[in-house]
Image (cartoon, rainbow, N blue to C red):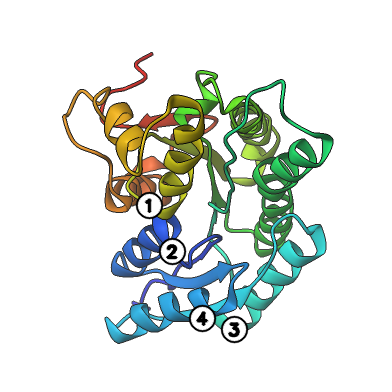
């Protein structure tokens, strides 16, 4: 009996934070991982860490707001790692502003990365998966802000609501090809992105460094801030055969803030 074919995952925004946690978890699960980030150095560091732990990984710099870059990322993955079975469209940005302050440039950038990046990754991955003919899994980053609009994060929330729409539409369109499409919705995660949100909220709430993070963390039913590993554990499930019958969903993993 021949050995099962090694599965291959792409993780965008994997140079740090949640993306790094996801990439390292999938590698620990036995997948070969293409580590992608807009910052080539951080992508390389994550790939090197995976390799040092005994996994197989490569690194590729890409700006997910550029459709051609997303297709080039998938092409490089197939060439270097032998295919693509899982796409984790994790890359994203946040910005703290009231709706009355958001500029056209703010909105364009937010949608280009958080929504456009998910769509372009979905397109590139689906095209390759259909050609390969063995199905696949497309997993994208939404947020609790994709289920509930948050003040001072309105345009960010809108982008994450949009990810849920793409997830549902993609699940319906790609099911015939054996491709599932799901999203994950983290809450308050102890990462550099939340450090930036904390600093931005401080200007509105009059809080000092770390105080907004602490204040919002008090909303968590389980009583502690979320880690990248908490999110990665859920993505590991979505990427596994155990989730083969799950599609079109945007599951909340936030320790109990938004409950639906």
Asked if disc 1 and disc 2 are in contact, CB closer than 8 Å, the reply is yes
Question: How packed is label 3: few (under 14 Cα within 10 Å), some, or many (20 or more)?
Answer: few
Observer-nearest of 198 and 168 = 198
Observer-nearest of 25 and 246 = 25
Q: Quadrant of residue 75?
A: bottom right
**Residue positioned 34% across, 16% down in the render:** 259
> In this figure, which residue is indicated by the disc labeled 2?
16
| Whole-number angstrom distance, CA of label 4 to CA of label 2 | 15 Å
Estimate the x, y position of residue 201 in percent, counting from the top left: 47, 33
Asked if disc 1 and disc 3 are in contact, CB closer than 8 Å, the reply is no
> In this figure, which residue is indicated by the disc labeled 1?
191
| Whole-number angstrom distance, CA of label 1 to CA of label 3 | 30 Å
For the question of whether residue 82 can be seen, the reply is: no
Q: Is residue 231 above or below residue 8?
A: above
> Which of pointers 4 and 1 indicates the residue nearer the eye?
1
**Residue positioned 81% across, 64% down in the render:** 68
Question: How packed is label 2: few (under 14 Cα within 10 Å), some, or many (20 or more)?
Answer: many
**Residue positioned 24% across, 25% down in the render:** 218
Q: Quadrant of the N terminus?
A: bottom left
Q: Residue furthest left?
A: 223
Q: Earlier in the sequence, mark 3 or mark 4?
A: 4
Observer-nearest of 93 and 169 = 93
Please state if 163 lies on the left or on the right of 189 as rendered: right
Estimate the x, y position of residue 88 in percent, counting from the top left: 52, 54
Estimate the x, y position of residue 245 in percent, counting from the top left: 43, 35
Q: Earlier in the sequence, mark 2 or mark 3?
A: 2
> In this figure, which residue is indicated by the disc labeled 4?
58
Numbered disc 1: secondary structure: loop
């Amino acid at each position: 009996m021949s050995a099962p074919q090694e599965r291959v995952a792409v993780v965008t925004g994997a140079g740090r934070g949640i993306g790094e946690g996801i990439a390292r978890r999938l590698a620990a699960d036995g997948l070969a991982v293409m580590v992608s980030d807009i910052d080539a150095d951080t992508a390389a560091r994550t790939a090197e860490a995976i390799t040092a732990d005994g996994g197989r990984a490569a690194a590729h710099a890409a700006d997910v707001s550029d459709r051609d870059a997303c297709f080039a990322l998938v092409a490089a993955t197939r060439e270097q790692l032998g295919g693509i079975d899982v796409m984790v469209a994790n890359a994203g940005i946040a910005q703290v502003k009231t709706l009355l302050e958001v500029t056209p440039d703010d909105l364009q950038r937010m949608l280009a990365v958080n929504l456009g990046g998910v769509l372009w990754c979905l397109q590139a991955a689906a095209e390759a998966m259909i050609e390969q003919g063995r199905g696949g899994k497309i997993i994208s980053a939404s947020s609790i802000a994709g289920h509930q609009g948050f003040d001072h994060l309105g345009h960010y929330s809108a982008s994450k609501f949009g990810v849920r729409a793409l997830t549902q539409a993609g699940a319906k369109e790609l099911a015939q090809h054996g491709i599932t499409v799901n999203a994950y919705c983290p809450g308050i995660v102890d990462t550099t992105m939340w450090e930036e949100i904390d600093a931005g909220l401080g200007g509105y709430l009059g809080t000092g460094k770390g105080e907004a993070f602490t204040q919002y963390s008090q909303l968590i039913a389980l009583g502690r801030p979320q880690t990248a590993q908490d999110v990665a554990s859920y993505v590991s499930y979505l990427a596994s055969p155990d989730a083969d019958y799950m599609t079109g969903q945007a599951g909340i993993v936030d320790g109990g803030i938004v409950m639906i």
